[in-house]
Image (tube, rainbow, N blue to C red):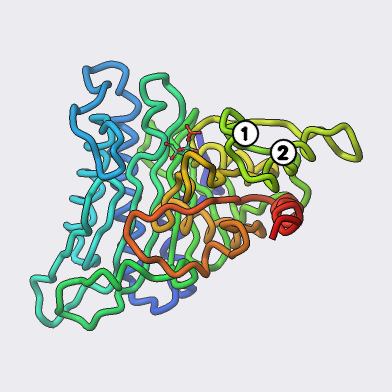
Amino acid sequence: MLGKKHKTLGEFIIENQSSFQYSSGELSRLINAIRLAAKVVNHEVNKAGLIDILGAAGDTNIQGEDQQKLDVLANDIFIQTLKNREIVCGIASEEEDDFISINSNDEKHQNKYVVLIDPLDGSSNIDVNVSVGTIFSIYRRITPAGTPVQLEDFLQPGNKQVAAGYIVYGTSTMLVYTTGDGVNGFTLNPALGTFYLSHPDMKFPDNGKIYSVNEGNYVHFLQGVKDYIKYCQEEKEDRPYTSRYIGSLVSDFHRNMIKGGIYMYPKSSVSESGKLRLLYECNPMAFIAEQANGKAIGGRTRILDIVPTELHQRVPFFVGSKNMVDKLQEFLDKYK
Ligand code: P6P
């Protein structure tokens, strides 16, 4: 039984309220809304194998991927929870072709935040009982109060995020997030429905030794990426490194942040821009990575400095321990 020494997420949010920029309490309420939605989705994910919720919903999302029923359910849960709180003026989701504008009912009170979300990343793993996750990214709106939210509110560079985080529905369910003042991880006690601070001040270990990439695509990678993978595999100095790839970004990222490692989803001759989405996968994970002493690049550029051009755009993504990302950069630069 967790004793008093384990702070709850609610206590942590209150205690750290003052460190939130523009701390008017709304960002706290927004994180609390995500906490509630995470518990509801966790409940559905954990029983997915028990009721006929598996299998595609027969529909496909804008990415052309079969929509698993759990994808749709998680999307609805997060959107409804965020809508109900009168804090958010717009939501963009991997599962929604366009963003959703939420105009405040109260003319005087304007909702200040936009949220971008991947409600259930790695959903193809659901049917084989492998961890999946939710990823979220939070900005303050750009457009003046009152007007419907425009695309510019969403197409902000990642360095403007005010908060970002993920939930990993794994052997235990964890919520990990940052508001720009470090990264903290909270583990759900399912018996109590309470998240407890289990991983304070998370940091990537300096020298990672795990590399995560789908090596089945090796033949399609740029030469610099191929050279780096061979570097990881050669028997020299502290190598060969360990290869670990779950096929679920949140799970691979989470393990690498704890043990040290690099996750790579390069562009290739089959996916010209890579597979991962800048706005609701790469930017939030890059914000967390940099807050945890790690690094995130899209090739030659820092992920957080990329100016987005469209809601569902994809970018190549390399994220993890600084030493590993820097070494990869050296190999990429050889072919400038
Ligand atoms: P591949 C899941 O679909 C995802 O977006 C990430 O969570 C995961 O790391 C990657 O795609 C897996 O893609 O092409 O290796 O199956």
Residue type, mark 1 in image: Tyr
What's the residue at 47%, 59% (across, down)? 283
Judging from the image, what secondary structure is the residue with disc 2 in?
helix
Q: Nearer the viewer, mark 2 or mark 1?
A: 1
Residue 51: in sight, yes or no? yes
Quarter-wise, where is residue 198 in the image? top right
Quarter-wise, where is residue 238 in the image? top right
Residue 322: in sight, yes or no? no
Of callouts 2 and 1, the N-terminal one: 1
Residue type, mark 2 in image: Ile
Residue linked to disc 2: 229
Image check: 231 left or right of 284? right
Residue 20: percent from the left, percent from the top?
Answer: 45, 72
Residue 60: percent from the left, percent from the top?
Answer: 23, 35
Mark 2 surroundings within 10 Å by alpha-carbon count, few (fewer than 14), some (14 through 19), many (20 or more): many
Residue linked to disc 1: 218
What's the residue at 67%, 59% (across, down)? 293
Label disc, if present, on residue 184 of the rendered structure = none
* Cβ–Cβ under 8 Å for marks 2 and 1: yes
Task: Report the front residue among 151 and 259.
Answer: 151
Residue 59: percent from the left, percent from the top?
Answer: 19, 32
Image check: 192 left or right of 69? right
Q: Measure the C-alpha gap from mark 2 to mark 1.
A: 9 Å
Image position of 276 with respect to 153: above or below: above
